[in-house]
Image (spheres, rainbow, N blue to C red):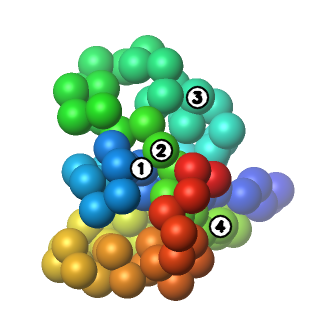
Amino acid sequence: MINEQAYVYIMASKRNGTLYLGSTDSLASRVWEHRNGVVEGFTKRYGCKLLMWYEAHDDLMMARRREYQMKEWKRAWKIREIEGLNPDWDDL
């Protein structure tokens, strides 16, 4: 079995703005979809176009497990994760 890398990521509308947490096996493609409003839904409705944080995993199942875990977190914990990797909230 071949392991392919997968990602958990956080998109934001702006610094300290609306956050979206997701997982994917193709980070570049998924970020492009969010930025270009290709898929109807939360990120398009709230303008979450900036990649603020991501974390790589060995496979999509592991990434999804982490995503579901993080979705239970308080907002402050997610912001702490973002600022640990990206203290200036730069669009990655």
Q: Which residue is at the far right?
A: 2
Please say if the residues under marks 1 and 3 sit with CB atoms less than 8 Å apart.
no
Q: Amino acid at mark 3?
A: Trp
Q: Residue at x 37, y 83 (%)?
A: 80
Mark 3 or 2, which is nearer the eye?
2
Q: What secondary structure is found at the residue carrying circle 4?
A: strand
**Mark 1 or 3, nearer chain start:** 1
Q: What secondary structure is found at the residue carrying circle 3?
A: helix
The alpha-carbon separation of the residues under discs 3 and 2 comes to 10 Å
Q: Residue at x 30, y 26 (%)?
A: 44
Residue 56: assigned label: 4
The alpha-carbon separation of the residues under discs 2 and 4 comes to 18 Å
Residue 26: assigned label: none
The alpha-carbon separation of the residues under discs 1 and 3 comes to 11 Å
Mark 1 or 2, which is nearer the eye?
2
Residue 50: assigned label: 2
Residue 11: assigned label: 1
Q: Is residue 54 visible?
A: yes
Q: Is residue 61 visible?
A: no
Residue 66 image point, x, y percent: 42, 72
On screen, residue 67 versus residue 91, left or right, reads left
